[in-house]
Image (cartoon, rainbow, N blue to C red):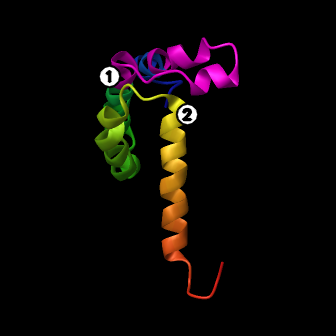
Amino acid sequence: MLTHDEQAFGLLVRALRPFVKQPTNLDVLETRLDRDSIDSLLKFAARLSRTAPKMRARIAGAKAIARAVEGATLGQVLRAANLSLERGAKSTRKPGRR
């Protein structure tokens, strides 16, 4: 999709620019999700929704939380997502299994 849609490619580049400019992985994790990055991601998601209908449900979920994470660092968002996944995995396990 990105190779065929220059506007989508540009939106994604704009959204990721603050992260790819960082010299180390730690710096990437400490980079805050700013308004411009969130706006670009949401515009990219809107374009993707129109061109990839099978992904609409996942995209809608991501769009719903995008504004909530504005101002947080990437590391904070990833830690919160990991905790959420761990809780979900624990709740789906059968009794007596670890």
What residue is shown with label 1? 39
Number of marks drawn: 2
Residue visible at 52% across and 21% down? Answer: 31
The 10 Å Cα crowd at callout 2, few under 14, some 14 to 19, many 20 or more, is some
Q: Callout 2, which amino acid?
A: Gly
Q: Is residue 45 above or below residue 13?
A: below
Q: Which residues are magenta?
A: 13-40
SS for callout 2: helix
What residue is shown with label 2? 75
Q: Position of residue 63 (x, y in %)?
A: 32, 39
Q: Is residue 62 above or below residue 6?
A: below
Is residue 56 located in the magenta-colored stretch of the structure?
Answer: no
User: Could you tell me what secondary structure mostly forms the magenta stretch?
Assistant: helix
Residue visible at 48% across and 46% down? Answer: 80
Circles 2 and 1: CB atoms closer than 8 Å: no
Q: Callout 1, which amino acid?
A: Asp
The 10 Å Cα crowd at callout 1, few under 14, some 14 to 19, many 20 or more, is some
Q: Position of residue 43 (x, y in %)?
A: 32, 26
- Residue 19 is left or right of residue 8, and the answer is right
Q: Foreground mark, 2 or 1?
A: 2
Is residue 29 located in the magenta-colored stretch of the structure?
Answer: yes
